[in-house]
Image (tube, rainbow, N blue to C red):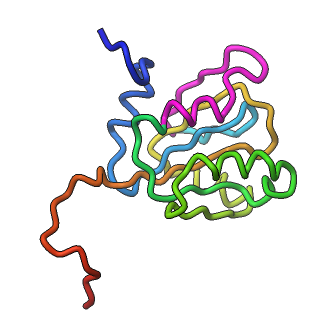
């Protein structure tokens, strides 16, 4: 029996299925889930669980190379955005795009985890990193 990490079977499978450069969204309660995109609905009640709580659990077992959020979030909830950014190493880039573009991009993600969060524009798109376990004899930059 699994006793550590994410124990939700669907989320565990979704994260394990994601390969390098695949995208996963953790969204608020109001985010429109596109037809045909796999999703797991975690909503238990208003504001539970929140995006930040789910993000913390995901980050314990999932490698991220880039984070994308709606630029509107920096206006409506700048402290929230700062808390999210603080969860990542400084070398992980953040990209902010219009919410309308974020929704369009959601059509092609590997999966979506829906929370009960009512924080406006709290949606987070995680771009999967490689495991960091690849061996390289040369660590320099390759140029064509």
- Residue 124 is left or right of residue 136, and the answer is right
Residue 55 lies within the magenta run: yes
- Across and down, in percent, residue 137 comes to 12, 71
Instruction: Establish if 142 lies above or below 11.
Output: below
* Magenta-tinted stretch: 37-58
For the residue pair 103 and 82, the one nearer the viewer reads as: 82
- Residue 53 is left or right of residue 12, and the answer is right
Instruction: Establish if 49 lies above or below 28.
Output: above
Residue ranking furthest to the left: 137
Instruction: Establish if 76 lies above or below 56.
Output: below
- Residue 78 is left or right of residue 59, and the answer is right
For the residue pair 97 and 92, the one nearer the viewer reads as: 92
Quadrant of image for the C terminus: bottom left
Residue 54 lies within the magenta run: yes
Residue drawn at (29%, 54%) of the image = 132
Residue drawn at (44%, 35%) of the image = 60
- Residue 11 is left or right of residue 40, and the answer is left
- Across and down, in percent, residue 121 comes to 77, 46
- Across and down, in percent, residue 76 comes to 87, 51
């Amino acid at each position: 029996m699994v006793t550590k990490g994410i124990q939700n079977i669907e989320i565990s499978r979704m994260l394990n299925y994601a390969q390098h450069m695949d995208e996963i969204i953790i969204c608020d309660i109001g985010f429109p889930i596109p037809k045909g995109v796999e999703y797991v609905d975690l909503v238990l009640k208003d504001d539970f669980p929140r995006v930040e709580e789910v993000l913390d659990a995901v980050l314990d077992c999932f490698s991220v190379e880039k984070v994308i959020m709606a630029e509107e979030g920096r206006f409506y909830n700048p402290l929230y955005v700062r808390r999210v950014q603080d969860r990542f190493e400084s070398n992980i880039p953040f990209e902010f795009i219009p919410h309308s573009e974020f929704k369009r991009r959601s059509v092609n993600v590997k999966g979506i985890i829906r929370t009960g969060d009512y924080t406006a524009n709290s949606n987070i798109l995680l771009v999967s990193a490689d495991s960091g376990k690849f061996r390289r004899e040369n660590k320099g930059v390759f140029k064509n």
